[in-house]
Amino acid sequence: MVFLRTQDEHLKANLQKVIDFMEVNERRPSKYVPEEKLMHHWWKHQQKLFNAGLLKEDRIGMYKQLIETGERYRHVNQYT
């Protein structure tokens, strides 16, 4: 038997993966670390969809949850 995931299930899985990563590592995914690169690119793609107004209504709430979590772990420059 082959089980296929819907787009919503895929979105929720990616969202939870990124949020879990940030909570465990206390930072955002990096585009320079190969293991984190896909999470970073997925997040940036969601951001582009949101900014362009192309993100579906039911997904906007999930995206805002991602943004709130990301703000808690935003990089702060140590030299300022």
Image (cartoon, rainbow, N blue to C red):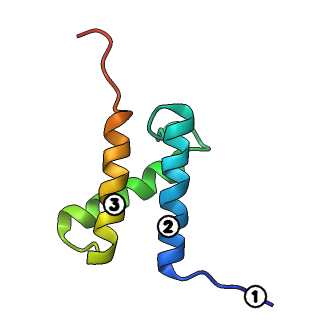
Q: What's under tag 2, amino acid-wise?
A: Lys
Q: Quadrant of residue 77?
A: top left
Residue matched to label 1:
2
Residue matched to label 3:
63
Cα distance in 3D space between marks 2 and 1: 20 Å
Residue 76 position, x and y percent, is 31, 22
Tell me the quarter of the image containing the N terminus.
bottom right
34 to the left or right of 31: right
Give me the residue at 24% from left, 64% from top: 50
Q: Nearer the viewer, residue 68 or 14?
A: 68
Q: Quadrant of residue 61?
A: bottom left
79 to the left or right of 25: left
Dot 1 or dot 3: first in sequence order is 1
2 in relation to 25, above or below? below
Cα distance in 3D space between marks 2 and 3: 10 Å
Instruction: Report if the CB atoms under discs 2 and 3 are less than 8 Å apart.
Output: no
Instruction: Report if the CB atoms under discs 2 and 1 are less than 8 Å apart.
Output: no
Residue matched to label 2:
12
